[in-house]
Image (cartoon, rainbow, N blue to C red):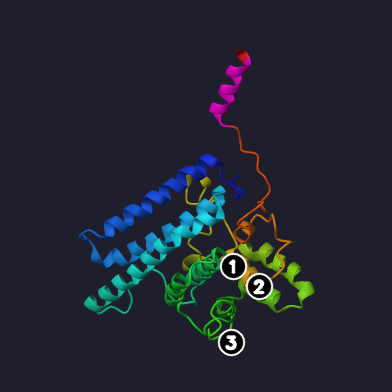
Amino acid sequence: MTRAPMGNMEYWNKWVAHSDSRTRKMLAALKLPSKNPVYDPQYSLDAAIEYFRLIVERYSRGDPIHELAQHFPGLLDAWELSNRLAERICREHKLATCRDWTFALSSLNHYNWCFWLVGLALALEIPDDQWQRLLALVEGEGQDVLLDRVIASRSPDRKIGERLQHGKPYARLLKAIDAPREQRAALLKDFVDHWYAELARKGKDELWWYIYGDPEKHPLEMGSYFGRWCIEAVAAVKAFGLDDSLCLGHEYYPGDLLRPNGPSTHPARIEPETQRSWFVRLLGKKQ
């Protein structure tokens, strides 16, 4: 059963296969002599993003939760390689940065990326060695009160920041965490309800994935949509034991990540009938 509210099984099969193949091809290409070494750090980072897409596409398709963590080491390998290549290129060319997007938690794109990976790592309970590798990549210790506290749920020595880098929508999640126990469930749902709308930004601050699946700006047929999942909420539930009962079945809430043995928290979908299946049924009636 597909978990995502958009895309039929044919769509998800196609793009899961695409991401699986692309990650392998990208890492293989990075082992060959490069025609454009300056671009290699970004290309390797793109491979890490493709691994993330693969994990989330498989979740959206309805794959077993226990199978998703197998892709985490490849993601870490690609991100670590990207950092090593960037350091080398910057050193050789005496550049301040080799990145196409800002690697700092003050950048919403980077903050969102790091929060998603921390949330997946907590929910999938990745091994300690992978967790430590992830924290080394995320960096930013002591810079954000919310992300630091979520990380500290597994790494208690984490230094906690004093400010929240991105008020919209994350002030709502921080409020849910700090609220009296009887209010947390409703406030968590309030965060999930507003999550997508309050992540809207314009121009260079727009999130790279935000318009995927938008029927006018980036329709489903283009294949970039991998689901719109509020993994940050799952991270908080896992870290602080919040009651997520009011969020179950929400179009943005990936509740199955926390329930690997099922049953699914997502409403059952009726798959649209394909032309072929309709034709086969028609023939069957005539016989």
Residue 66 pos. (x, y %): 54, 56
- Point 47% across, 80% down: residue: 140
Q: Is residue 185 left or right of residue 27?
A: right
Task: Give the mark nearest the N terminus, 1 or 2.
Answer: 2
Mark 2 residue type: Leu
Residue 106 pos. (x, y %): 50, 77
Is label 3 in a helix, a strand or a loop?
loop
Q: Quadrant of residue 186?
A: bottom right
Any part of residue 195 in sight: yes
Q: Is residue 180 magenta?
A: no
The furthest residue to the top:
287
- Residue that numbered label 1 is attached to: 232
Q: Residues under labels 1 and 2: Cα distance?
A: 9 Å
- Residue that numbered label 3 is attached to: 162
Image quadrant containing the N terminus: top right
Q: Residues within 10 Å of mark 1 (few under 14, many from 20)?
A: many
Residue stretch in magenta: 274-285
Residue 133 pos. (x, y %): 42, 73
Mark 3 residue type: Glu
